[in-house]
Amino acid sequence: MSEGMLKDKFARTIRDLRISVTDRCNFRCFYCIPDEDIVWKRKQELLTYEEIILVAKIGAGLGVHKLRLTGGEPLVRRDIEYLIEELAKIPGVSDLALTTNSFELKDRAIALRSAGLTRLTISCDSLNADTFKTITRRDGLQEVLDGIEAAVKAGFPAPKVNCVVIRGLNDGEVADFADFSRATGVRMRFIEYMPLDNGHQWDRSLLVGGREILQKIKERHEITPISRDTPSETALRYVFADGAPGEIGIIAPVTMPFCGACSRLRLTADGNLRTCLFSMVDHNIKDRIRRGDDEELIRQFMIETVLKKEEGHRINESDFVQPPRTMSFIGG
Ligand code: SAM
Ligand code: SF4
């Protein structure tokens, strides 16, 4: 094992820390969060910004160079711009990204860029206002589209747009999203629906596999594969053969798993390290910080936790058990 690196026992190196800053959200995407009876974490249960910065600094010292802020909805946590400014100063962090539902992005894109955010990923599952509302349980399509436009104007390099494809809901819009990419220059990321949903309603019949998504695009546009930027990149990428702007990416964790190249570690809003989206266990780092462990002890804890990283998810195994926490708690 190389000294000073986060390496797991399958020889994968951790380069990417996903930080959930809140479990709260202003949307209620049916696959992610219940619409009622939500018991939010109390403020004192969440990591403070200082605690998040500490974990990020130690991670960066161990070779993490990419940080992604997520949630819940990261823009609902107060003064997120301050956190971004501080994370951007950490030596070794070359990529500082954020995933948002974009509802509040329009008025904040410039401030986020100025704070030091390098990349934005925006979630949008439908371009049809009614379907959008059915999925998110909120009226918000226009705000999201305005947010995407504001992100482009603020100078973020070709924002990515995540679209979870669900049979019978938005699978008829895949080619329309490809048109949207051509028109706006955003990079589409079509994501397979994963069994991480609130209410455990996931069912294989709702899954639209990556190959089928590609086929739907090819029926309207000729596309050409391009290589991944890094070996751990999750998306299979394509550009339009006629040279139009935009890009297509397929993220197929269920039908084409990419666990073998995984470089990710997650930090939940309530202060647990998670080695995989589908882990059944959390590794509590908050209690260690709050009881006064010094940086060296926290560093050792991170190294030991990464050694427990699972070889891969087991979605396609007959004994697969869905984890109890959904994406809004884990951080997508
Ligand atoms: N609120 C922000 C947003 O929606 O972009 C960030 C957090 S959200 C949990 C991150 C991403 O996870 C979103 O693109 C969302 O669509 C995706 N996601 C949530 N649950 C999912 C599931 N069961 N399968 C696939 N993607 C999911
Ligand atoms: Fe909120 Fe994002 Fe989950 Fe939708 S996917 S409920 S926007 S955290």
Image: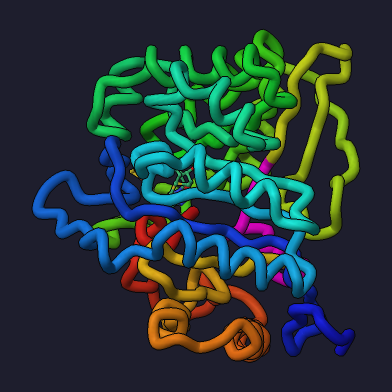
Instruction: Tell me if 303 is positioned left or right of 322 in this view.
Output: right
Which residue is found at the position 71% from the left and 16% from the top? 185
Of residues 215 and 35, the one nearer the viewer is 35
Magenta stretch in the rendered image: 250-262
Is 182 inside the magenta-drawn segment?
no
* Horizontal and vertical percent position of residue 146: 47, 13
The question of residue 252 being in magenta is answered with yes
Whether residue 316 is visible here, answered yes or no, is: no
Residue at point 70%, 19% (across, down): 155
Q: Is residue 77 above or below residue 158?
A: below
Which quarter of the picture shows residue 272? bottom left
Residue at 72%, 31% in the rendered image: 248
Residue nearest the viewer, comparing 239 with 79: 79
Residue 228, horizontal then vertical, whole percent: 85, 46
Q: Main secondary structure of the magenta part?
A: loop
Determine whether 233 is above or below 189 in the image.
below
User: Looking at the image, can residue 100 be seen?
Assistant: yes
Q: Quadrant of the N terminus?
A: bottom right
